[in-house]
Amino acid sequence: MRVANMKELVLQRARHLTRSPLFTQTDTRILEVSRKSPEQIDIRELEILIERRPDLRDQIIEEANSSYYGLHYAVASLHQAIVIIGLYNLLSVTMITSLSEVFEGNTRMTRLGLDSFLSHSVGVGAAARAAANVALSTLVPPMEIQISGILHDVGYSVFIRNFPRDFDRCIEQALRERRPLRDIEMEVFGIAHDELGGHLARAWNLPDYVVQSAEFHHRVALARHPHDELVALIGWVDRLVLEEADTAGGNRTLPLESHSPADDPSLAVHYAALFETLERNRDEILNSARKAMNRARRKGPDEEEDAEAGD
Ligand SMILES: [Fe+2]
Ligand SMILES: [Fe+2]
């Protein structure tokens, strides 16, 4: 098939995907409530909402019982689990559960498994929040920055759901030729996951900073004020998290997607203060990502046992 036709087909599938919302009504409500400021949060309201999603309820209780929290007793009540894991982790768990559903049925079809994809997404989410805490003066709340990070690669869902074999070939070629996966996506599909992510996020009516983070994390020069710094930050942490996965050897299925925006001379000058602060806090940012990725990997729906053994 010609690349132009392939691109039209991919866009058609993307439109199809956006006919249903990214999050169910209940999940949207849960995310809305957990995004309120701490003094306004009604845990009882959250509990009632979460009780309507038994699989999510189980995931939250499982999260609270994970060794990460180091409890010496078993948590059985949802209320207690919410208090123990806290709102940032609640947000991650809710988004992971929802995102898993976007990939319905295709969880094992590509070399980029669901587990790797989700752990990369929550890693970038946690790193972006930690990075923004030290490096960004923005009006966007930390919870929203975490959401922007978690969703930055959502465009991959179109390839994974609809073109698993072609996408697998892209990954293999990128690994073999040591070329950025994004370049191969352009050659094969005529469109890459970042542009697709922008289409999806816009169609789902997500806020502009989420749209821009998805659309421009590999093309930071195109990001628009006032969210361009946030996009530069996401691009920087994305590369950091990928490098970490690559050196740790645990998540080699996502070939290094691109260079860090800090390697681009004009961006390096434009965002000099930002990149300098990020570099100075590199270890702390990486640590936040590691913790989130380890937890996500432990809970990955397809590789529970492997991940448990690997921790
Ligand atoms: Fe990406
Ligand atoms: Fe990424």
Image (cartoon, helix red, strand yellow):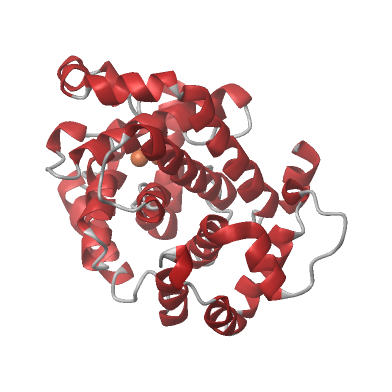
Examine the rendering and report whether any part of residue 103 can be seen: no
Q: Is residue 173 above or below residue 118?
A: above
Is residue 80 depicted above or below 140 in this figure? below
Above or below, 247 against 103 in this view is above
Image position, residue 206 (x, y; %): 27, 63
Residue depicted at 35% across the width and 29% down the height:
236
Q: Is 161 or 293 nearer to us in this picture?
A: 293
In-image side of 211 versus 243 (left or right):
left
Question: Which residue lies at the image location 69% right of the left edge and 59% below the top edge?
Answer: 63
| Left or right for 150, reference 303 | left
Residue 10 lies, in percent from the top left, at 26, 56
Judge from the rendering whether residue 248 lies leftward or rightward of residue 306; answer left or right.
left
Query: In the rendered image, is residue 8 in sight?
Result: yes
Of residues 28 and 76, the one nearer the viewer is: 76
> Taking 85 as reference, is 256 above or below it?
above
- Closest to the observer, 4 or 67: 67
Q: Quadrant of residue 171?
A: top left
Question: Hey, which residue is sitting farthest top in the picture?
Answer: 265
The C terminus, quarter of image? top right
Residue at position x 32%, y 18% from top?
Answer: 276
Residue shown at the point (69%, 74%) measured from the top left: 78
Q: Quadrant of ligand 1?
A: top left
Residue 293 horizontal/vertical position (percent): 59, 42
